[in-house]
Image (cartoon, coloured by chain):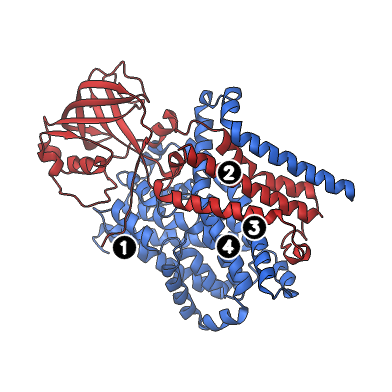
C-alpha cells in the first residue's frame, strides 16, 4: 500500500516534470529532432486537429460545468414541474429553450444527458439536441452573411431544422422513450448523496465537472483526430464535379458535413464556397445535417448515450433531413420559400 | 488511493491544457489556430483549467465515495491511465509545433472560393470600382472582392495592388498563378481560400511565397465562373505577415 502510494506520486512528479520541460523547451529541441516540414500532410492534420481542439474545448468544458450544475443544484421536482406533460407542447417548449440557450453542439450533449437522467422526457431532450446548435443568433447571422444573394438558404435552414425537430421528437416519443442514457449508476451513486452543506457541494461540483470533462473529452479527441484526417485528405474539388444531381448531391453534402465536423457558427462560409457546384437543396443538407451530427459529436454521444439509441438517432436524423432537403430543393427551384 | 491518483492526474492534465493555451497565446500562435473572436473563450478556459487544476491537487475528504460515476465499472487502472493519456496528444502538440500553416497540397484540395464573399459589413457598393487605383488591404479585402465580382464588365484596365501568397493548381498554365489569402471564421478547420487569378511572367515566383503585386484588371474565368483576373505588371517579394489570416468577423447587425 505504502509502496503503491509512492509509485503513484513518483509517476505524477515525473509527468509534471515532463510537462514543464515541454512547456519551456518543447519548441526548441523537438522540431530539430522531428522535422514536420518533411511531412506537410501530417503537419496539416496535426494543425487542423489542434485548431479543432482549441475551438471546442472551452465549450466542452462549459457543457461539463452546466451538466454538473444541473446534477447538483437542480432537483427532479423542479424539472417535473417545468416540463409540459403533453408531448407536442414539450417539443415546442424545447425548441423555445434552444432559441434562448446560446450553445453549440459540443456543449449541449452532456447537458441533455444530465437533463434526461433528471427526468426530462427523452423526446424533449432529443429536440434540444437537434435544434440547439442551429437555432441561435450567431448561426443566423453567419448564414445570412454567407448567403446574402440567396436568402432562401437562411429561411430553409431554420424551417427545416424546426420541422426535423418536431418529426424526430414525435418519433422518439412513440417508439423509444426510455432507457437511452448510458450508466444509470450515476443516479444510484447520488441517491445516497448526503452532501448538504455548501462547501462540500462545491467540492463535489468541481469533482463532477472535472470527471465529466475528461469522460466526454477523450471521445471528442478521438473524433477530432478522425475529422482532421478527413479534413486534410478529402479532395473537395473532385467532389464538386459529382454533386450536380439532387439525390447524389444532397447525400454527398451531408456526408461531407459529417466528416468535416465544422462548428455550426462557421459552417455557412464553407457551405458558401461549395455553392457554385451544388444545388440549394444539397447546400441545405450540409447546413442542417452538419450541426446535428458529425464525426466528433457522434463520439461524444457514444460517451453519453446507449449505443442502440445513438444508432437509432443517427439513422433517423439522416433519413428525415435527407428527405426534407430534397423536398426543399424542389420548392426552391420552383421559386418557393 | 487509486481514485486520488486519478484525481491528481486530472489536475495535472488540466494544468497541462492551461499551460498549452498559455504558451500559444503568449507566443502569438493562438490566432493562427482560432479566430480572434474565439480567443476570449480560450482564455476563459485557461483560467478555469488552472483554478480547477489547483483544486484537484488538494485531497478531498469525501471524494472517495462521492462521485465515481464511472470508476465502478472500469477495473484496470492501466486502462484508465491509457484513456487519460489521450489528452497528452493536444498538450504535446501545443508545446512542440512551431509551424502552424496548412501545406500547399492541402489548400489545393480545397480550391479557391470565388463566387460568394463573406461580406460582413455594409459599405458603399461601387466605392472601390470607381477609384482609379485599387489598393487592397486586410480590412477592405472582401469589400473589394465583392465590388469587383458585381461589376465585372466595367473593371477592365483598372489598376490594382494587393499582397498574398502564390497559389497554383495542377491545371494552371505556365503563365498563370493565383495570389491568394486564407480566411477563417472560427478556427483553422474552416479556413477558406480566396484569391485572384494572375496572368503574366510568373514562372520564377514560387508557390507559397508572399508577394505584393500590381497589375491591371480584366474579366476572366476560374473553373467556368466569371472572375476578375489580374495582368501582372510588377511584383515584389515580401515576408509572410504575422497576421497571415483574414478573419470573417460576423457581427450581429441592427
Give coordinates of residue A224: x percent, y percent: 55, 46
Give coordinates of residue A112: x percent, y percent: 56, 67
Give coordinates of residue B208: x percent, y percent: 37, 26
Cα distance between the residues tagged 1 and 2: 43 Å
Q: Which chain is mark 2 on?
A: B
- Determine whether, in the image, residue A10 is placed left or right of residue B88: right
Q: Nearer the viewer, mark 4 or mark 2?
A: 2
Cα distance between the residues tagged 4 and 2: 21 Å
Contact, mark 4 vs mark 2 (Cβ under 8 Å): no
Q: Are marks 3 and 2 on the same chain?
A: no
* Residue wearing tag 3: A210
Q: Which chain is mark 1 on?
A: A
Contact, mark 3 vs mark 2 (Cβ under 8 Å): no
Within 10 angstroms of label 1, few (less than 14), some, or many (20 or more) residues?
some
Q: Nearer the viewer, mark 1 or mark 2?
A: 2
Q: Which mark is residue A155?
A: 1
Chain letter of the red region: B
Q: Nearer the viewer, mark 1 or mark 4?
A: 4
Q: Which mark is residue B201?
A: none
* Residue wearing tag 2: B19
What element does badge 2 sit on?
A: helix
Within 10 angstroms of label 4, few (less than 14), some, or many (20 or more) residues?
many
User: Closer to the N terminus: mark 3 or mark 4?
Assistant: 4
Q: Nearer the viewer, mark 3 or mark 1?
A: 3
* Residue wearing tag 4: A65
Amino acid at each position: 500500500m505504502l509502496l503503491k502510494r509512492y509509485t503513484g506520486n513518483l509517476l505524477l512528479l515525473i509527468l509534471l516534470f515532463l510537462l514543464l520541460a515541454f512547456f519551456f523547451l518543447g519548441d526548441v529541441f523537438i522540431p530539430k529532432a522531428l522535422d514536420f516540414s518533411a511531412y506537410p500532410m501530417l503537419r496539416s492534420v496535426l494543425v487542423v486537429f489542434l485548431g479543432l481542439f482549441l475551438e471546442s474545448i472551452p465549450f466542452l468544458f462549459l457543457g461539463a460545468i452546466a451538466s454538473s450544475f444541473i446534477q447538483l443544484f437542480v432537483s427532479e421536482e423542479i424539472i417535473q414541474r417545468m416540463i409540459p406533460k403533453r408531448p407536442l407542447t414539450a417539443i415546442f417548449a424545447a425548441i423555445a429553450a434552444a432559441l434562448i440557450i446560446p450553445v453549440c453542439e459540443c456543449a449541449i450533449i452532456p447537458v441533455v444527458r444530465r437533463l434526461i437522467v433528471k427526468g426530462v422526457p427523452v423526446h424533449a431532450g432529443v429536440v434540444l439536441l437537434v435544434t440547439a446548435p442551429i437555432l441561435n443568433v450567431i448561426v443566423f447571422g453567419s448564414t445570412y452573411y454567407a448567403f446574402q444573394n440567396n436568402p432562401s438558404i437562411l429561411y430553409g435552414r431554420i424551417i427545416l431544422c424546426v420541422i426535423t425537430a418536431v418529426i424526430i421528437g414525435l418519433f422518439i416519443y412513440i417508439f423509444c422513450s426510455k432507457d437511452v442514457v448510458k450508466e444509470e449508476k450515476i443516479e444510484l451513486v447520488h441517491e445516497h448523496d448526503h452532501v448538504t452543506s455548501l462547501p462540500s457541494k462545491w467540492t463535489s461540483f468541481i469533482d463532477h465537472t472535472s470527471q465529466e470533462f475528461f469522460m466526454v473529452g477523450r471521445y471528442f479527441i478521438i473524433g477530432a483526430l478522425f475529422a482532421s484526417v478527413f479534413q486534410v485528405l478529402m479532395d473537395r474539388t473532385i467532389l464538386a464535379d459529382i454533386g450536380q444531381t439532387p439525390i447524389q448531391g444532397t447525400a454527398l453534402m451531408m456526408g461531407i458535413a459529417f466528416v468535416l465536423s465544422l462548428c455550426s457558427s462557421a459552417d455557412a462560409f464553407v457551405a458558401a464556397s461549395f455553392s457554385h457546384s451544388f444545388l440549394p437543396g444539397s447546400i441545405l443538407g450540409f447546413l442542417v445535417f452538419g450541426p446535428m451530427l458529425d464525426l466528433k459529436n457522434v463520439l461524444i454521444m457514444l460517451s453519453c448515450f446507449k449505443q442502440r439509441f445513438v444508432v437509432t438517432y443517427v439513422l433517423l436524423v439522416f433519413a428525415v433531413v435527407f428527405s426534407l432537403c430534397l423536398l426543399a430543393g424542389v420548392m426552391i427551384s420552383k421559386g418557393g420559400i | 488511493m487509486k481514485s486520488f491518483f486519478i484525481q491528481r492526474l486530472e489536475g495535472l492534465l488540466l494544468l497541462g491544457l492551461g499551460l498549452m493555451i498559455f504558451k500559444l497565446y503568449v507566443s502569438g500562435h493562438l490566432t493562427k489556430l482560432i479566430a480572434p473572436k474565439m480567443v476570449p473563450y480560450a482564455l476563459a478556459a485557461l483560467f478555469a483549467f488552472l483554478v480547477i487544476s489547483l483544486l484537484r491537487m488538494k485531497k478531498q475528504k469525501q471524494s472517495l465515495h462521492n462521485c465515481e460515476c464511472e470508476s465502478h465499472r472500469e477495473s484496470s487502472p492501466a486502462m484508465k491511465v491509457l484513456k487519460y493519456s489521450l489528452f497528452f496528444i493536444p498538450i504535446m502538440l501545443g508545446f512542440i509545433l512551431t509551424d502552424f500553416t496548412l501545406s500547399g497540397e492541402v489548400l489545393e484540395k480545397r480550391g479557391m472560393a470565388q463566387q460568394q464573399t463573406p461580406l460582413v459589413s455594409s459599405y458603399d457598393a461601387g466605392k472601390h470600382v470607381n477609384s482609379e487605383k485599387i489598393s487592397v488591404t486586410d480590412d477592405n479585402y472582401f469589400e473589394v472582392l465583392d465590388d469587383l465580382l458585381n461589376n465585372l464588365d466595367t473593371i477592365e484596365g483598372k489598376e490594382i495592388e494587393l499582397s498574398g501568397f502564390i497559389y497554383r493548381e495542377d491545371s494552371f498554365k505556365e503563365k498563370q498563378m493565383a495570389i491568394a489569402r486564407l480566411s477563417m471564421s472560427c478556427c483553422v478547420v474552416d479556413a477558406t481560400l480566396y484569391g485572384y487569378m494572375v496572368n503574366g511572367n510568373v514562372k520564377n515566383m514560387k508557390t507559397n511565397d508572399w508577394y505584393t503585386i500590381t497589375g491591371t484588371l480584366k474579366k476572366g474565368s476560374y473553373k467556368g465562373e466569371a472572375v476578375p483576373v489580374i495582368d501582372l505588371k510588377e511584383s515584389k517579394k515580401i515576408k509572410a505577415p504575422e497576421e497571415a489570416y483574414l478573419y470573417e468577423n460576423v457581427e450581429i447587425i441592427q
